Amino acid sequence: MKTLAVFIIILNISMPSFSQKKHKHKTRNYVPISWYKTTYKTPLTKKDSLNFKFNDQDTLVLITNKMKTIGTFVDYVYKDSLFLNEYKKIAFNHKNDSLDYNTTMKYWKNDIKLFFSKSVSKKERKSILSFAREISNKVDSLTIYEAKNHEDSNYVIYYTGDYEYEQNLKNYNRADFWVYWNNNSNQLYKGSIKINNQKFFSESLRIAEIKKLLFQSLGYFKLSNNYNCDSYFSNCHSNNKQITDFDYELLQYHYCYGICKGTSLETFEAQHESVKNMMKEHDHAIHKFHYPNY
């Protein structure tokens, strides 16, 4: 199934109500009836119809706490155009560096479960897992941890001379990663990192390279030459990379549910343009609705 998301304007209508002591204003929330039918599973009753409002030929339904949705509402996450331009350069990894509006963003829906081959030392494994925990603690909807058995994992880290866990990396003679994704939803579900431990001859070199490749594979990201070398989104080689504030901001945005996931660049730009126009025209709250299993 393709990623499905709906941006919804919640119409906030203030209805006056009075008490003996003071004057209050009560806010009522309405949505168009067409959105109600695709968003809520609670059937409308004759009693509900008594609270219908009409606005520009739309029938508006009063939303109450008893009405149950088939998914969840999440606040739309606003970012300015400068941030979005940088994000698009990273999240949409175009083939052969050629701009293609059909290119899609990739993300991990399920937990990343790392398996280390026996050649990976205890020190290396400990450093990588510490790195993974740091990311997991700061990025919502992204969890990375160790799987003790290969059959329980979905991500393998191994060295030249080990069992060839990923045939697509068999002829790589330095270091690289390989990931798989579902073509319908663009959800990543399997990954591998292979390191040539003769060319990366020290533990520190191997640790730095694994961290770089693991970070890049969190979204099949496109690295850039325009960022400081310390950034994990920088294509510049460095053994002293740190997850910068910029790195975290982009990664957190990629995994937040206030944006549509797995979309093409064309869809991503169209949705943000649509929301921008809605924000100009309406002084109302804008939410993103998530259907189950997305």
Image (cartoon, rainbow, N blue to C red):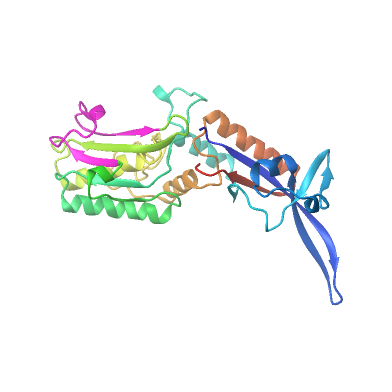
Q: Is residue 239 visible?
A: no
Q: 43 left or right of 288? A: right
Q: 253 left or right of 78? A: left
**Between 97 and 273, the one nearer to me in the picture:** 273
**Between 177 and 188, the one nearer to me in the picture:** 188
Q: Is residue 280 visible?
A: yes
Q: Is residue 44 magenta?
A: no
Q: Give x and y (percent) for residue 64.
A: 71, 56
Image point (83%, 52%), residue name: 50
Magenta segment boundaries in residue numbering: 155-181
Q: Give x and y (percent) for residue 92.
A: 46, 32
Q: Is residue 175 magenta?
A: yes
Q: Give x and y (percent) for residue 218.
A: 38, 41
Which image quadrant for residue 66? bottom right
Image point (17%, 53%), residue name: 122
The total number of labels drawn is: 0
Q: 60 left or right of 249? A: right
Q: Give x and y (percent) for residue 290.
A: 57, 44
**Between 59 and 6, the one nearer to me in the picture:** 59
